[in-house]
Image (spheres, helix red, strand yellow):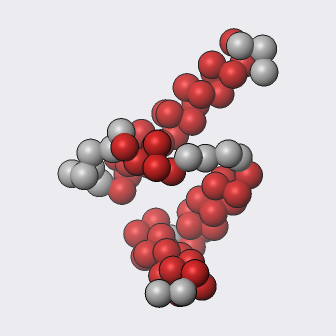
């Protein structure tokens, strides 16, 4: 698969599972901030639903923001 095909397929999958608006928000969030998908993915359980994975990702993001604020960043 080419890079373009992978991007298109990824967007199709996101849109199918979370809808167009949320898929666009996801892409915007990923582009807006540094994000290590591999590190984040290591902590996920394969049996979780899309909604549960999303909640875990948001909680992780929130905890990192809180740590950065406490650390003076």
**Quadrant of the image for the C terminus?**
top right
> In the displayed structure, does residue 12 sit left or right of residue 31?
left
Quick one: 58 or 36, which is closer to the camera?
36
Vertical relation: 41 (above or below) 72: below
How far across and how far down the image is residue 71, in percent?
Answer: 71, 13
Question: Taking the image as drawn, is residue 8 in sight?
Answer: no
Single out the residue that lies furthest toward the left. 47
How far across and how far down the image is residue 30, in percent?
Answer: 64, 55
Vertical relation: 21 (above or below) 6: above
Residue at the spot 63% in from the left edge and 63% down from the top edge: 27
Single out the residue that lies furthest toward the front. 2
Question: Taking the image as drawn, is residue 19 in sight?
Answer: yes
Residue at the spot 60% in from the left edge and 85% down from the top edge: 4
How far across and how far down the image is residue 50, in percent?
Answer: 36, 56
How far across and how far down the image is residue 64, in percent?
Answer: 59, 28
> In the displayed structure, does residue 4 sit left or right of residue 69?
left
């Amino acid at each position: 698969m080419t890079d373009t095909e992978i991007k298109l397929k990824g967007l199709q999958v996101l849109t199918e599972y979370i809808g167009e608006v949320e898929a666009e928000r996801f892409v915007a969030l990923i582009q807006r901030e540094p994000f290590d998908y591999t590190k984040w993915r290591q902590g996920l359980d394969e049996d979780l639903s899309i909604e549960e994975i999303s909640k875990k990702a948001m909680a992780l993001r929130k905890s990192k923001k809180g740590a950065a604020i406490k650390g003076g960043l």
